[in-house]
Image (tube, rainbow, N blue to C red):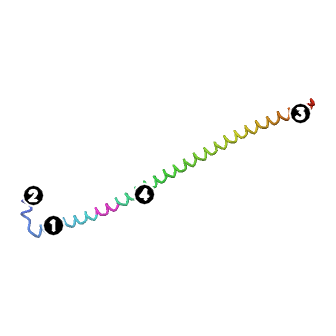
Amino acid sequence: MTDKELRRLSRAELLEMLLVQVEENEKLKLQIEEMQTQLDNRQIMIDKAGSIAEAAMQLNGVFQAAEAAAAQYLENIQRLSGEGGGQHEEKQDSGDADCLSIEGRTETGEI
């Protein structure tokens, strides 16, 4: 509406227009509040999802560290078994050679 048209209106008509505008303004304020509440709820959900994702990543890191520690433990066990087995075989071979040497000396009469 132009200024001329507004000046031609009576007070009652102007008050009625003002009341309509106030009612519309109130409705829009309520709508803004509802939308703000929905936005806050979504933000909370997003924050929770972010914290859940962070927790999952941290747990994943813990599991990876545990898996690496277990693999290292198994490697050490295998390495130690391999080294121990080799030492045992060397001692066995050395003991067998000593026995043969003693047998040979007893047969020849050295002992």
Mark nearest the camera among 3 and 4 is 3
Along the viewing direction, whichever of 31 and 106 lies nearer the viewer: 106
- Dot 1 amino acid type: Leu
Pick whichever of labels 1 and 3 is earlier in the sequence. 1
Pick whichever of labels 2 and 1 is earlier in the sequence. 2
The answer to which image quadrant residue 17 occupies is bottom left
In the image, what residue occupies the spot 17% across and 68% down?
Answer: 19
Q: How far, Cα to Cα, is label 3 from label 2?
A: 130 Å
Mark nearest the camera among 3 and 2 is 3
| Relative height, residue 98 to residue 11 (above, below) | above
Screen quadrant of the N terminus: bottom left
Q: Is residue 19 left or right of residue 58?
A: left
- Dot 2 amino acid type: Thr
| Residue topped by disc 3 | 103
Q: Which mark is residue 45?
A: none
Q: Which residues are magenta?
A: 31-38
What percent of the width, then of the height, locates residue 77? 66, 44
